[in-house]
Image (cartoon, rainbow, N blue to C red):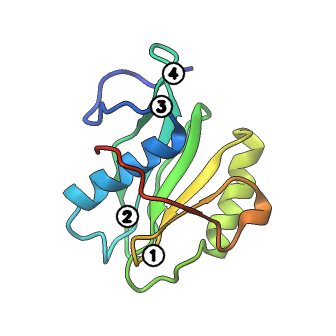
Amino acid sequence: MSAPRSGPVLATYGTADEAAVGGYRYVLKKMHDVTSREYNFYVWRASYDKLWHYSSPVGGTANSSDLKVPTYAGGYCHTHPAHSGPNFSSQDREQFLTASKFIPGIAFYLMDPMQQLHVARQICDFMAGQDLSWLKVDP
């Protein structure tokens, strides 16, 4: 299944990592309270164009955000506000374990409070994750 074409975020990318970085650039550009609230979105590969996209970011509280990740998602992306640590949390790890049962191969992405990017593609990547560079993509 593919996500619908409509929506506020229509940028396209060649890889899931590029789509995640594009989504984080969008969050930094448009969400002015990113240091005090957690934001999340997901990335998916569309069947109609075989390119990667990111969903519209959802803002939450200072400690969490609520986003339903569809089974066609290739990655779950979120931020940690300024009072959080630089690593994935134990709750992130538990969410990954649950999500990977329903969405095999899903990656979890994190932008930490210092705006460093991390990705976890398997359970052994938690808690620090693997570093992900700020790829040169537009939001």
Distance (Cα) linking label 1 and label 4: 30 Å
Residue contact at pointers 4 and 2, CB within 8 angstroms: no
Q: Nearer the viewer, mark 3 or mark 1?
A: 3
| Mark found first going from the N terminus, 3 or 1 | 3
Question: Crowdedness of circle 1 by 10 Å Cα count: few (<14), some, many (20+)?
Answer: few
Q: Are marks 3 and 1 in contact (CB under 8 Å)?
A: no
Residue that mark 1 sits on: 63
Amino acid type of the residue tagged 2 in the rendering: Gly
Relative height, residue 20 to residue 12 (above, below): below
Residue for badge 4: 2
Give the position of the N terminus as an image quadrant.
top right
**Distance between the alpha carbons at the discs numbered 2 and 3:** 29 Å
60 with respect to 86 (left or right): left
Residue that appears at 47% across and 82% down: 84
Q: Are marks 1 and 2 in contact (CB under 8 Å)?
A: yes
Q: Amino acid at mark 4?
A: Ser
Q: Earlier in the sequence, mark 3 or mark 4?
A: 4
Mark drawn on residue 60: 2
